[in-house]
Image (spheres, rainbow, N blue to C red):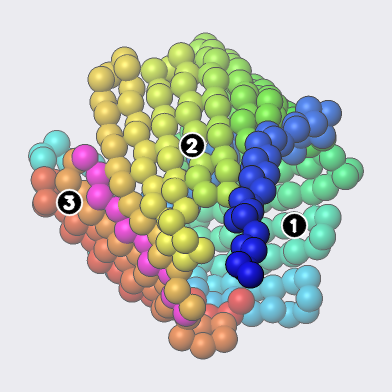
Amino acid sequence: MATLVPPPTTPPPAPAAEAVKPEKVDYMDLPCPIPYEEIHREAMMSLKPDHFEGMRVDFTKGLNQKFSLSHSIVMGPMEVPSQSAETIKIPTANYEFGANFIDPKLMLFGRVYTDGRLSARVKCDLSENLIMKANAQLTNEPHMSHGMFNFDYKGTDYRTQFQLGNGNLLGASYIQSVTPHLSLGGEVFWTGQHRKSGIGYAARYNTDKMVASGQIANTGMVALSYVQKVSEKVSLASDLMYNYMSRDVTASFGYDYILRQCRLRGKIDSNGCTSAFLEERLNMGLNFLLSAEIDHKKKDYKFGFGLTVGE
Protein backbone atom coordinates (compact mmCIF):
# COMPACT_ATOMS: atom_id res chain seq x y z
CA MET A 1 0.00 0.00 0.00
CA ALA A 2 1.42 3.31 -1.02
CA THR A 3 2.31 5.68 1.77
CA LEU A 4 0.17 8.76 1.76
CA VAL A 5 2.27 11.93 1.92
CA PRO A 6 0.43 15.02 3.12
CA PRO A 7 0.68 17.99 0.82
CA PRO A 8 3.23 20.64 1.90
CA THR A 9 1.76 23.45 3.89
CA THR A 10 2.81 27.02 3.20
CA PRO A 11 3.60 29.06 6.32
CA PRO A 12 1.18 31.84 7.03
CA PRO A 13 2.34 35.24 5.81
CA ALA A 14 4.23 37.27 8.39
CA PRO A 15 2.24 40.16 9.77
CA ALA A 16 3.14 43.46 8.23
CA ALA A 17 5.37 45.62 10.38
CA GLU A 18 3.39 48.29 12.06
CA ALA A 19 4.25 51.76 10.87
CA VAL A 20 6.15 53.78 13.44
CA LYS A 21 3.82 56.46 14.64
CA PRO A 22 5.35 59.89 15.13
CA GLU A 23 5.64 60.97 18.71
CA LYS A 24 2.79 63.21 19.69
CA VAL A 25 3.92 66.62 20.89
CA ASP A 26 2.18 68.21 23.85
CA TYR A 27 2.53 71.91 23.11
CA MET A 28 1.16 72.73 26.55
CA ASP A 29 4.13 70.99 28.20
CA LEU A 30 7.21 72.30 26.36
CA PRO A 31 10.60 72.57 28.14
CA CYS A 32 11.92 75.88 29.41
CA PRO A 33 14.67 77.23 27.11
CA ILE A 34 18.08 78.43 28.26
CA PRO A 35 18.63 82.21 28.67
CA TYR A 36 18.83 84.27 25.49
CA GLU A 37 22.42 85.33 26.22
CA GLU A 38 23.52 81.67 26.45
CA ILE A 39 22.18 80.28 23.17
CA HIS A 40 25.79 79.62 22.00
CA ARG A 41 26.78 78.09 25.34
CA GLU A 42 28.05 74.72 24.11
CA ALA A 43 30.07 76.25 21.28
CA MET A 44 31.58 78.87 23.59
CA MET A 45 32.68 76.24 26.09
CA SER A 46 34.40 74.19 23.38
CA LEU A 47 35.88 76.98 21.22
CA LYS A 48 36.69 79.72 23.73
CA PRO A 49 38.30 78.42 26.93
CA ASP A 50 40.04 80.75 29.35
CA HIS A 51 43.39 81.10 27.54
CA PHE A 52 46.25 82.85 29.30
CA GLU A 53 49.95 83.58 28.79
CA GLY A 54 52.76 83.08 31.25
CA MET A 55 52.25 81.50 34.66
CA ARG A 56 49.08 81.32 36.73
CA VAL A 57 48.43 79.86 40.18
CA ASP A 58 44.95 79.76 41.73
CA PHE A 59 44.42 78.68 45.33
CA THR A 60 41.01 78.34 47.02
CA LYS A 61 40.59 77.65 50.73
CA GLY A 62 37.18 76.79 52.14
CA LEU A 63 36.57 78.15 55.64
CA ASN A 64 33.19 76.42 56.00
CA GLN A 65 30.49 74.99 53.77
CA LYS A 66 29.44 78.41 52.46
CA PHE A 67 32.43 80.74 52.76
CA SER A 68 35.80 80.47 51.03
CA LEU A 69 38.82 82.63 50.19
CA SER A 70 40.80 82.60 46.95
CA HIS A 71 44.24 83.78 45.91
CA SER A 72 45.48 84.12 42.34
CA ILE A 73 48.91 85.05 40.99
CA VAL A 74 49.43 85.80 37.30
CA MET A 75 52.86 86.49 35.78
CA GLY A 76 53.13 87.11 32.06
CA PRO A 77 53.35 89.70 29.30
CA MET A 78 50.62 92.21 28.54
CA GLU A 79 49.87 93.55 25.08
CA VAL A 80 50.09 97.31 24.54
CA PRO A 81 48.50 99.27 21.67
CA SER A 82 50.79 99.76 18.69
CA GLN A 83 50.51 101.13 15.17
CA SER A 84 52.81 98.47 13.78
CA ALA A 85 51.65 95.07 12.58
CA GLU A 86 53.69 93.24 15.20
CA THR A 87 52.39 92.76 18.73
CA ILE A 88 54.26 94.61 21.49
CA LYS A 89 54.25 93.10 24.99
CA ILE A 90 55.58 94.21 28.35
CA PRO A 91 56.15 91.92 31.37
CA THR A 92 53.60 92.25 34.17
CA ALA A 93 52.63 90.52 37.40
CA ASN A 94 49.34 90.68 39.25
CA TYR A 95 47.84 89.36 42.47
CA GLU A 96 44.15 88.86 43.09
CA PHE A 97 42.39 88.28 46.42
CA GLY A 98 38.84 87.00 46.46
CA ALA A 99 36.06 86.14 48.89
CA ASN A 100 33.17 83.85 48.00
CA PHE A 101 29.86 83.13 49.71
CA ILE A 102 27.77 80.34 48.17
CA ASP A 103 24.27 79.50 49.39
CA PRO A 104 21.47 77.71 47.50
CA LYS A 105 19.61 81.03 47.11
CA LEU A 106 22.43 83.59 47.35
CA MET A 107 25.91 83.79 45.81
CA LEU A 108 28.42 86.58 46.47
CA PHE A 109 31.82 86.94 44.78
CA GLY A 110 34.31 89.74 45.41
CA ARG A 111 37.77 90.38 43.93
CA VAL A 112 40.52 92.92 44.71
CA TYR A 113 43.47 93.39 42.34
CA THR A 114 46.87 94.95 42.96
CA ASP A 115 46.32 97.44 40.12
CA GLY A 116 43.48 99.02 42.09
CA ARG A 117 40.49 97.33 40.49
CA LEU A 118 37.60 96.03 42.58
CA SER A 119 34.90 93.73 41.19
CA ALA A 120 31.81 92.11 42.67
CA ARG A 121 29.12 89.70 41.47
CA VAL A 122 25.81 88.80 43.08
CA LYS A 123 23.23 86.16 42.23
CA CYS A 124 20.05 86.03 44.31
CA ASP A 125 16.95 83.85 43.88
CA LEU A 126 14.13 86.24 44.71
CA SER A 127 11.57 83.48 44.11
CA GLU A 128 11.35 80.11 42.41
CA ASN A 129 11.02 81.79 39.01
CA LEU A 130 12.75 85.17 39.45
CA ILE A 131 16.55 85.54 39.68
CA MET A 132 18.46 88.78 40.18
CA LYS A 133 22.07 89.11 39.01
CA ALA A 134 24.36 92.09 39.51
CA ASN A 135 27.99 92.80 38.67
CA ALA A 136 30.13 95.86 39.13
CA GLN A 137 33.74 96.94 38.67
CA LEU A 138 35.49 99.97 40.10
CA THR A 139 38.79 101.19 38.67
CA ASN A 140 41.06 104.22 38.85
CA GLU A 141 40.81 104.82 35.11
CA PRO A 142 38.19 107.40 34.17
CA HIS A 143 34.98 106.18 32.52
CA MET A 144 36.01 102.53 32.97
CA SER A 145 33.92 101.69 36.06
CA HIS A 146 30.63 100.02 35.32
CA GLY A 147 27.71 98.22 36.92
CA MET A 148 24.74 96.20 35.68
CA PHE A 149 21.59 94.58 37.06
CA ASN A 150 19.92 91.63 35.36
CA PHE A 151 16.50 90.20 36.23
CA ASP A 152 15.75 86.75 34.83
CA TYR A 153 12.19 85.37 34.94
CA LYS A 154 11.79 81.67 34.18
CA GLY A 155 8.38 80.51 32.95
CA THR A 156 7.16 77.03 32.09
CA ASP A 157 8.17 77.20 28.42
CA TYR A 158 9.70 80.68 28.10
CA ARG A 159 12.29 82.93 29.70
CA THR A 160 12.55 86.70 29.76
CA GLN A 161 15.30 89.04 30.95
CA PHE A 162 15.59 92.73 31.74
CA GLN A 163 18.92 94.57 32.01
CA LEU A 164 19.76 97.92 33.56
CA GLY A 165 23.28 99.35 33.50
CA ASN A 166 25.24 102.56 33.84
CA GLY A 167 25.39 104.88 30.87
CA ASN A 168 21.59 104.65 30.62
CA LEU A 169 21.77 101.11 29.28
CA LEU A 170 18.41 99.37 29.00
CA GLY A 171 17.87 95.92 27.53
CA ALA A 172 15.22 93.23 27.35
CA SER A 173 15.11 89.77 25.82
CA TYR A 174 12.55 87.00 25.43
CA ILE A 175 12.94 83.40 24.27
CA GLN A 176 10.14 80.88 23.75
CA SER A 177 10.11 77.12 23.16
CA VAL A 178 8.17 76.48 19.94
CA THR A 179 8.70 72.70 19.84
CA PRO A 180 10.51 70.32 22.23
CA HIS A 181 13.74 71.02 20.30
CA LEU A 182 13.31 74.51 18.77
CA SER A 183 13.26 77.83 20.58
CA LEU A 184 12.97 81.34 19.12
CA GLY A 185 13.70 84.68 20.74
CA GLY A 186 14.45 88.35 20.35
CA GLU A 187 16.09 91.26 22.16
CA VAL A 188 16.04 95.06 22.22
CA PHE A 189 18.46 97.49 23.85
CA TRP A 190 19.03 101.21 24.24
CA THR A 191 22.18 103.07 25.28
CA GLY A 192 21.25 106.58 26.29
CA GLN A 193 24.86 107.71 26.62
CA HIS A 194 25.60 107.01 22.94
CA ARG A 195 22.04 107.49 21.69
CA LYS A 196 21.97 104.09 20.02
CA SER A 197 19.34 101.39 19.94
CA GLY A 198 19.28 97.88 18.56
CA ILE A 199 17.14 94.84 17.97
CA GLY A 200 18.12 91.22 17.44
CA TYR A 201 16.68 87.79 16.81
CA ALA A 202 17.89 84.29 17.65
CA ALA A 203 17.01 80.65 17.05
CA ARG A 204 18.29 77.47 18.71
CA TYR A 205 17.69 73.83 17.80
CA ASN A 206 19.02 71.09 20.06
CA THR A 207 18.76 67.32 20.36
CA ASP A 208 20.68 64.71 22.32
CA LYS A 209 23.40 64.66 19.63
CA MET A 210 23.66 68.21 18.32
CA VAL A 211 23.03 71.91 19.00
CA ALA A 212 22.60 74.55 16.27
CA SER A 213 22.20 78.25 17.06
CA GLY A 214 21.86 81.42 15.03
CA GLN A 215 21.73 85.09 15.98
CA ILE A 216 21.38 88.32 14.01
CA ALA A 217 21.14 91.98 15.04
CA ASN A 218 20.74 95.30 13.27
CA THR A 219 24.18 96.32 14.55
CA GLY A 220 25.60 94.19 11.72
CA MET A 221 26.38 91.08 13.75
CA VAL A 222 25.56 87.60 12.47
CA ALA A 223 26.60 84.61 14.61
CA LEU A 224 26.12 80.94 13.75
CA SER A 225 27.32 77.94 15.77
CA TYR A 226 27.00 74.18 15.56
CA VAL A 227 28.07 71.47 18.03
CA GLN A 228 27.98 67.75 17.20
CA LYS A 229 28.28 65.22 20.01
CA VAL A 230 30.27 62.34 18.50
CA SER A 231 30.28 60.29 21.70
CA GLU A 232 30.02 60.75 25.44
CA LYS A 233 33.60 62.06 25.49
CA VAL A 234 34.10 63.77 22.12
CA SER A 235 32.35 66.82 20.67
CA LEU A 236 33.06 68.81 17.51
CA ALA A 237 32.15 72.49 17.29
CA SER A 238 32.20 75.25 14.68
CA ASP A 239 31.09 78.86 14.51
CA LEU A 240 30.85 81.73 12.04
CA MET A 241 31.01 85.41 12.95
CA TYR A 242 30.10 87.94 10.26
CA ASN A 243 29.55 91.68 10.32
CA TYR A 244 27.68 92.80 7.22
CA MET A 245 28.58 96.44 7.85
CA SER A 246 32.36 96.09 8.12
CA ARG A 247 32.45 92.91 5.97
CA ASP A 248 34.58 91.14 8.59
CA VAL A 249 34.10 87.39 8.75
CA THR A 250 35.73 84.72 10.90
CA ALA A 251 35.04 80.99 10.98
CA SER A 252 36.51 78.46 13.39
CA PHE A 253 36.43 74.72 13.95
CA GLY A 254 37.35 72.91 17.15
CA TYR A 255 37.08 69.84 19.30
CA ASP A 256 36.37 69.02 22.94
CA TYR A 257 37.79 65.74 24.26
CA ILE A 258 36.98 64.68 27.83
CA LEU A 259 39.04 61.86 29.33
CA ARG A 260 38.91 60.31 32.77
CA GLN A 261 41.51 62.65 34.26
CA CYS A 262 41.76 65.52 31.76
CA ARG A 263 39.93 67.68 29.25
CA LEU A 264 41.51 68.82 25.96
CA ARG A 265 40.09 71.58 23.78
CA GLY A 266 41.50 73.03 20.59
CA LYS A 267 40.52 75.01 17.51
CA ILE A 268 41.72 76.63 14.30
CA ASP A 269 40.11 79.64 12.65
CA SER A 270 40.03 81.16 9.18
CA ASN A 271 42.76 83.67 10.12
CA GLY A 272 45.24 80.83 10.62
CA CYS A 273 45.27 81.11 14.42
CA THR A 274 45.43 77.79 16.27
CA SER A 275 44.98 77.19 19.99
CA ALA A 276 44.79 74.38 22.53
CA PHE A 277 43.87 74.20 26.20
CA LEU A 278 44.56 71.24 28.52
CA GLU A 279 43.16 70.67 32.00
CA GLU A 280 44.78 67.72 33.77
CA ARG A 281 43.59 66.50 37.17
CA LEU A 282 46.70 65.38 39.03
CA ASN A 283 45.03 64.65 42.35
CA MET A 284 41.98 65.53 44.38
CA GLY A 285 41.88 69.33 44.42
CA LEU A 286 44.98 69.74 42.22
CA ASN A 287 44.71 70.57 38.50
CA PHE A 288 47.44 71.35 35.96
CA LEU A 289 46.74 73.77 33.09
CA LEU A 290 48.42 74.23 29.73
CA SER A 291 47.44 76.97 27.28
CA ALA A 292 48.80 77.73 23.81
CA GLU A 293 47.85 80.12 20.99
CA ILE A 294 49.79 80.57 17.75
CA ASP A 295 49.09 83.31 15.21
CA HIS A 296 51.75 83.17 12.46
CA LYS A 297 50.19 86.04 10.54
CA LYS A 298 50.61 88.52 13.40
CA LYS A 299 53.73 86.75 14.75
CA ASP A 300 51.94 86.43 18.08
CA TYR A 301 52.73 83.34 20.17
CA LYS A 302 51.21 82.74 23.58
CA PHE A 303 52.09 79.88 25.94
CA GLY A 304 51.07 79.46 29.54
CA PHE A 305 51.01 76.92 32.34
CA GLY A 306 49.29 77.00 35.70
CA LEU A 307 48.08 75.17 38.77
CA THR A 308 44.67 75.21 40.43
CA VAL A 309 44.68 74.16 44.08
CA GLY A 310 41.45 73.59 45.98
CA GLU A 311 37.94 72.85 44.84
Identified at 56% across, 34% down, the residue is 205
The spot of residue 200 in percent (x, y) is 53, 19
Magenta stretch secondary structure, dominant? strand
Q: Is residue 76 left or right of residue 135?
A: left
How many residues crowd around disc 3 within 10 Å: few (fewer than 14), some, or many (20 or more)?
some
Q: Secondary structure at mark 2?
A: strand
Disc 2/disc 1 C-alpha distance (Å): 31 Å
Quarter holding the N terminus is bottom right
Q: Secondary structure at mark 3?
A: strand
Q: Which residues are magenta?
A: 261-270
Find disc 1 in the rendering and name its residue: 107
Find disc 2 in the rendering and name its residue: 212
Q: Which tag is nearer the camera, tag 1 or tag 3? A: 3
Q: Is residue 59 magenta?
A: no
Look at label 3 and name its amino acid.
Asp
Q: Is residue 221 left or right of residue 62?
A: left
Find disc 3 in the rendering and name its residue: 295
- Can residue 74 be seen here? The reply is no
How many residues crowd around disc 1 within 10 Å: few (fewer than 14), some, or many (20 or more)?
some
